[in-house]
Amino acid sequence: MKETSARLLRLLTLLQTRRDWSGQDLADRLGVTTRTVRRDVDKLRDLDYPVHASKGIAGGYRLGAGAQLPPLLLDDGEAVAIAIALLTAASSSVSDIGETALRALVKLEQVLPSRLQHQVNALQLSTVRPPGSRPTVDTEVLTAIGTACRDRQVLRFDYSGHGGTTSARITEPHQLVTWGPRWYLVAWDLQRHDWRTFRVDRMRPAASTGPRFTPREIPGGDAAAYVARGVAQIWPYQAIVELHTPATSDAARDAATYGRIEPIDEHRCRFYFGAENVRGMVFLLGALDVDFRIEDAPELAEHLRQTADRYHRAIQSPALS
């Protein structure tokens, strides 16, 4: 019985690694006859694994999608990766996901070998929620939008703008992006004939989707960068800073996550960015770890002077002399 169970797990692993297998190939890999392979396939089907078989010269076996979730077979790396993903999901901004993720994590940890439990425990993260409330995203809304993106179907929804006004939008959804604690949809607005970024927590999709569409090329080809540029423009504090590093450098690429980079010459670039407050700007510039010059942001310049004075006083200690 133990040998048969081990062979079933091995057979399932083989079916997961390649789309199509002939009966003879599986028999050779498992060291059994094709008749035994057929019996083992039947046992997998009894466990609700949808193994499809086709006859003929090009026939064989294929693992398909089933009507219900069968038992999963994971290797060590996959099991640890899923456990870490569940830990992260437990603190996400998607409503009702946190409790579900914790339940799934408890089930997984119950069956993890001790060697894997030690790995997961070593990587456990403590989550500190920032003060104030964060917008949450309804699971059904997120699923509806993600499905429309995947199937390339026109998406209609009501959208609440910054001023609280609601408008009906018709879009070609391109991709969902997370930026900080929020979810955004990058989509082509069919009414405004331009690309737009929508906050998912402000969207209420219609019950049905529209016709299929041919995807357009997003500006720059990167949905995440497009969202970052769009979000940077709506922050209440804006600044233009000259970075003393090439536009192609790692520091400039990191900065582009929070705004827009414009080359000046082979040694410098211009950084357009925004933040919720001036302190956030100072923190971001310090994290880039490159020299810079403020071009247009008097309030940022004054805050930098105050910060520099405070740091200078911090090191005026006899013990540091």
Image (tube, rainbow, N blue to C red):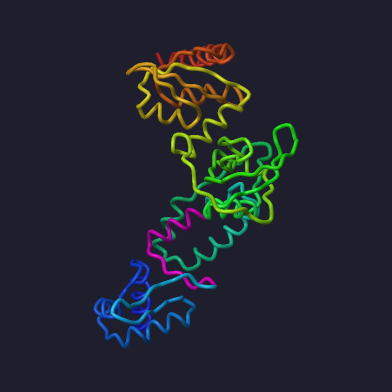
Q: Residue at x 47, y 83 (%)?
A: 46
Q: Judge whether residue 22 is colored magenta.
A: no
Q: Quadrant of the C terminus?
A: top left
Residue 142 percent location from the top left of the image: 61, 51
Residue 96 percent location from the top left of the image: 65, 55
Q: Judge whether residue 77 is colored magenta.
A: yes
Q: Residue at x 75, y 35 (%)?
A: 164
Q: Residue at x 61, y 28 (%)?
A: 234
Q: Quadrant of the N terminus?
A: bottom left
Q: Please give left or right for residue 22 compared with residue 72 in the image.
A: left
Q: Please give left or right for residue 159 compared with residue 69 in the image.
A: right
Q: Which residues are magenta?
A: 68-87
- Residue found at the very far right of the displayed protein: 165
**What is the tally of numbered marks visible in this picture?**
0
In the image, residue 37 sits, relative to residue 287, either above or below, namely below
Q: Please give left or right for residue 58 compared with residue 315 in the image.
A: left
In the image, residue 111 sits, relative to residue 272, either above or below, namely below
Q: Of helix, strand and loop, which mostly describes the magenta segment?
A: helix
Residue 133 percent location from the top left of the image: 68, 40
Residue 44 percent location from the top left of the image: 43, 80
Which residue occupies the foreground of this view, 23 or 267? 23
